Amino acid sequence: MKVYIRQKKSTVDVEGSCSVLELLRRLGYSQETVLVLRNGGLVTPDVRLSEEDEVEIIPVISGG
Amino acid sequence: MRCRVCGGQACVDVKRSNTAFCADCYQQYFQRQVARAIKKHDMLGTDDRPVIAVSGGKDSLTLWQVLLDMGYRADGLHLNLGIGEYSVNSQEKAAAFAESRGVKLITIGVAEEYGYGIPQVAKRTARSACSACGLIKRYLLNKVALERGFNVLVTGHNLDDEAAALLGNLLRWQSGYLLRQSPVLPSTHPKLLRRVKPLFRLTEREIAAYGLLRGVDWLVDECPLAAGAATLRYKEVLNQLEADSPGTKHHFYFGFLEKGSSFAAASPPVELRECARCGQPTTTEVCAFCRLWEQVKRDKALPVT
Ligand code: SF4
Ligand SMILES: [Zn+2]
Ligand SMILES: [Zn+2]
């Protein structure tokens, strides 16, 4: 599936289907620091993502 | 996951309370948290004229959104700091929000008013950008809001900000800063606005979730001058602890609010007077803002860019 990372304005390809939680683990994100959108809607960590889903990861921690 | 309130499909999980909500119930939960902060600390009363410090980032714009959702009337105040493209984009996001919601945004350009933006000020005074910027923001937000007849300055500080600042202040035992780490800073001078932080009970993640659900479009880019490495590191450490033990950030900061008040009791109140140059409240003869600009403008030979 295609995973868009908002802050970096970049896309990564992740193989196969997995849960949101697994996806974050694979990409090295902690749950507390991001939100995940599937096809434009917010999803909880237990949700299974499929190959066709458009996924976006939004990091929420800001400096300043 | 199911929504704790209505049993429908959940879309936001709140780990620290071991729960999840659907979109509608989450918004109600979030608004209740904000209402609780405002009520418990007397942040906003019916006679108040609040103004929101709006940067164009997620916290300030989501703060504006939730206050509007809750029926508050508040204008926004944006400072254009003159930090290249970042400032242009920040102002654009703030202005677009105001226009789409039909609310008023006051914009002040630091470079237009004073001749130099933050990068030049930092260079010409050999200060770190963030220290010059912090000083200028604190001063101008107060001054402009006061001149326009507002009496409360509302800022988007969240639980992560407050917990990270507390950790930083404790690590260096900055007792002076510890004193001022409160959800409400009362007005201690007729020319000093009360400052309130209605989002202090909520984490960055919770705030971003509300903003997304309400269609808030914020600037995701970080300031290119951010020396905020320290703040970010503290936030990272706290979020690691939070992952192992949900609720850590809340207990850390709320425990301080409860038990740390002895710091405040132990120190005498600071006497404020009016700056001899500009009349704004200060502890010194000439305020730090006036001294900063004197230094900036002193040596005309120094580089402008
Ligand atoms: S990161 Fe520093 S320079 Fe940039 S806006 Fe924040 S305080 Fe100002
Ligand atoms: Zn619900
Ligand atoms: Zn002054």
Image: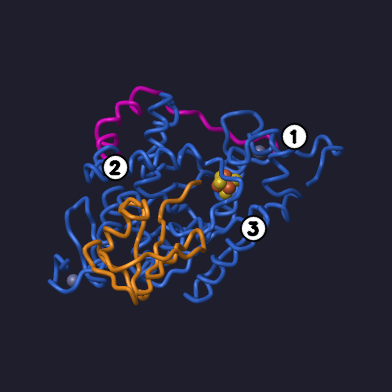
Residue matched to label 1:
B295
Answer with mark 2 or mark 3, whichever residue precedes in sequence: 3
Q: CA gap, disc 3 to disc 1?
A: 22 Å
- Callout 2 amino acid: Lys
User: Do discs 1 and 2 share a chain?
Assistant: yes
Q: Is residue B178 above or below residue B189?
A: above
- Callout 3 amino acid: Ile
Identified at 55% across, 59% down, the residue is B77
- Given residues B163 and B269, the one toward you in this image is B163
Residue B122 in the image, given as x and y percentages of width and height: 68, 39
Residue B126 in the image, given as x and y percentages of width and height: 70, 33
Horizontal side, residue B215 vs residue B16: left or right:
right
The crowd level at tag 3 (other Cα within 10 Å; few <14, some 14-19, many 20+) is: some
Is residue A49 magenta-colored? no
Answer with mark 1 or mark 2, whichever residue precedes in sequence: 2
Residue matched to label 2:
B249
Chain ID of residue with mark 3: B
Q: Is residue B152 above or below residue B72?
A: above
Identified at 28% across, 40% down, the residue is B241
The N terminus of chain A - image quarter: bottom left
Q: CA gap, disc 2 to disc 3?
A: 35 Å
* Secondary element at image label 1: helix
Chain ID of residue with mark 2: B
Chain ID of residue with mark 1: B
- The answer to whether residue B128 shows anywhere in this view is yes
Horizontal side, residue B141 vs residue B162: left or right:
right
Colour chain A appears in:
orange
The crowd level at tag 1 (other Cα within 10 Å; few <14, some 14-19, many 20+) is: few
Boundaries of the magenta span: B253-277
